[in-house]
Amino acid sequence: MSFEEFFQTLLLILLRGFLNTFVLSVGGFSLGLFLGTLIAFVQVFIGGVYSKVIDYVNKTIRSIPPILMLFIVFYGLKLNNIASAIIGLGIISFSYQSQIFRGIIEAIAARQLEAALSIGLDRWKSFRYIILPQVIVLSIPALLNEFTILLKDSSIAYAIGVVEMFTVSINIANARMEYVIPLASVAILYLIICYTISFVSNLIHKRIGSLGYGAPL
Amino acid sequence: MNVLLKAINIHKYFGKQHVLKGVDLEVEEGKTVVIIGPSGSGKSTLLRCLNLLIKPDKGTILFNGMDITRGKINIHRVRQEIGFVFQSYNLFTHLTAIDNVMLGLVKVKKMDKSMARKIAEEALISVGITEDLWKKYPAQLSGGQQQRVAIARAIAMSPKLLLLDEPTSALDPELTVEVLNVLEKLSEKKMTMIIVTHELGFAMRVADEVIFMEDGRIVEKGPPERILLAPEKERTKIFVSKLMELYRIDRRYK
């Protein structure tokens, strides 16, 4: 096993697989972000029966293994495999992201909202100028963390035939009848990406801490 | 004297719990009213009812002669004229001290920024927050400084009435003095205030009226000398004597 061979495999996986890995994780994450924010605000600001129903939906989603979720979407909706993977990952990610947002909103909302209303801001302006900016900043580290989880989860799209990084590495391995180098290469790629993101996330976390945001993360 | 605020027969329930059981209150313009009472007596709830942060279940609140508990009133407009200071300061965490004070002026009163900045600076100076602190975030300020910024935020809106919910309870003694001095100055300038506090010395010096509340009712009210030194009701006597005991300095310890 030469270094050159190793590096070539790594590059090959990156060239052939990274785009789809990127599309799946960013697509799934964006879908999750959209649904997650929406649902979290419904839960906190409307609450009641909606909140209970959403809680059950969330629990159900989180009880389903990610790979099964992908199969359900793929065979159930009969979409192409990339779209199915994005939707499947999006649904999984949404259930986690809505909890992230909900936690942060609940940690800051009561007191900050009271203060905002007390100076004469209406509900919409309180939300727009006081609650939302804080939620965005406070949620960044947790969201980046969630993104790395989703990025790794995107490898299960292998099961429905999406050619992303993991699939490429398996294909190379099968063709060469040699597994160590392709699998080690793809592992290192995931490691580099995730490590970089969590490094950035930690930096942001510290920066937020020094600004004194008190909400628990 | 002009009656600025009149609350008649205020009731509030939290679920089955009857928190306010028919409170009547009248505050004249320029007066300082201090509310004392054990925790759970409904002081904070009463204060929040007065600017409708909590909606009373029954009763009428007349502010400046206007019934603000009736449906058609724009409560956000009314709240511009009633400042509120919280026990835990509740400054906007993501904004600097001066931006905390300016926000209401710009977003609520629609002032242009330079005008708002001028008023905010005056308000901050009046509570003793010097220029070096204006650009600091709440977390970079001491509790006393945060509470004074919160007072500046409230008074910058030039409210007709200021409600303060245990403004010094979260502060250590030195910082408490900082904040009480600011409040004493406001009282001298005839700002109308209702303050929930257990600082008896402050109440004695500054209050025009002291109200003792217990169990959702007003037990006794009157001038501070009477309520604090010669209360009539047995329950007031016990409560005040306990507070006195707490703050007493005994010669034995010399």
Image (spheres, coloured by chain):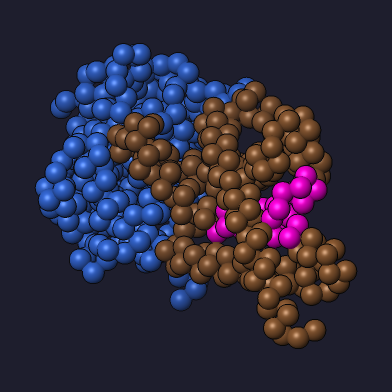
Q: Residue furthest top?
A: B71
Magenta stretch: dominant secondary structure = helix
Residue B157's x, y, as percent?
21, 41
User: What segment carries the magenta color?
Assistant: A141-168
Residue A17's x, y, as percent?
66, 59
Whether residue B239 is visible here, answered yes or no, is no
In the image, residue A131 lies in the stretch drawn in magenta? no
User: In the depicted view, which residue is nearer to us: B211 or B6?
Assistant: B6
Q: Residue at x 67, y 68 (%)?
A: A12
Chain appearing in blue on the rendered image? B
Residue B23's x, y, as percent?
42, 23
Where is residue B138, by image quadrant?
Answer: bottom left
Where is residue A210, by image quadrant?
Answer: bottom left
Please, is residue B62 above or below residue A123 in the view?
above
Q: Left or right of B182: which side holds B25? A: right
Whether residue A160 is visible here, answered yes or no, is yes
Q: Which shade of the palette goes to chain A?
A: brown
User: In the depicted view, which residue is nearer to us: B191 or A38?
Assistant: A38
Residue A57's x, y, as percent?
72, 32
Q: Residue at x 51, y 50 (%)?
A: B242
Q: Residue at x 78, y 65 (%)?
A: A172
In the image, residue A152 lies in the stretch drawn in magenta? yes
Q: Residue at x 77, y 29 (%)?
A: A76
User: In the depicted view, which residue is nearer to us: B80 or A144?
Assistant: A144
Q: Residue furthest right?
A: A177
